[in-house]
Image (spheres, rainbow, N blue to C red):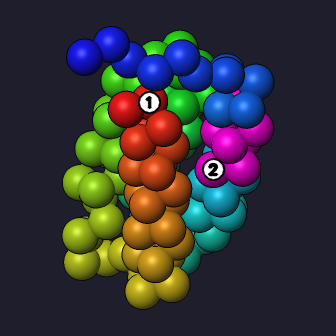
């Protein structure tokens, strides 16, 4: 089945919004450094995305750290929201 034709201008707007949510987590000093590092890597991946595989990689990175015992509860909720947004964006690609 062929992939859907995607308007990258609209996708870039969605990516910027998700990257902004990631920025909130990155600025939170209560979040451990290893988790901020993973979020920064995921942010870099989606900002340089040229195909839908990048969203899968970002989801994997965030899902991996979302279960860290040292992650504050409010940040865990933020990560789940980001993951959900990335999964919705990935679904647009079919």
Q: Position of residue 7 (x, y in %)?
A: 67, 22
Magenta region includes residue 14: yes
**Residue of label 1:** 93
Q: Residue at x 49, y 68 (%)?
A: 81
Instruction: State the separation of the CA atoms marked 2 and 1.
Output: 17 Å
**Residue of label 2:** 18
On the picture, is 78 further left or further right than 19?
A: left
Residue extent of the magenta highlight: 12-18
Residue 46: image quadrant is top right
Element at label 2? helix
Q: Residue at x 46, y 78 (%)?
A: 77
Task: Decide whether the magenta segment is chiefly helix, strand or loop.
Answer: helix
Q: Position of residue 31 (x, y in %)?
A: 49, 69
- In the rendered image, the quadrant that contains the N terminus is top left
> How would you rate the neighbour count of disc 2 (Cα within 10 Å): few for under 14, some for 14-19, many for 20 or more?
many
Which sits earlier in the primary sequence, circle 2 or circle 1?
A: 2
Magenta region includes residue 75: no
């Amino acid at each position: 089945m062929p992939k859907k034709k995607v308007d990258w201008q609209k996708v870039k707007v969605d990516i910027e919004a998700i990257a902004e949510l990631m920025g909130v987590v990155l600025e939170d000093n209560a979040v451990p450094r290893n988790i901020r590092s993973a979020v920064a890597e995921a942010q870099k991946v989606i900002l340089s995305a040229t195909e839908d595989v990048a969203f899968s990689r970002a989801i994997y990175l965030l899902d991996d750290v979302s279960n860290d015992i040292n992650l504050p509860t409010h940040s865990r909720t933020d990560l789940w929201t980001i993951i959900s947004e990335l999964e919705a964006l990935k679904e647009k690609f079919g």
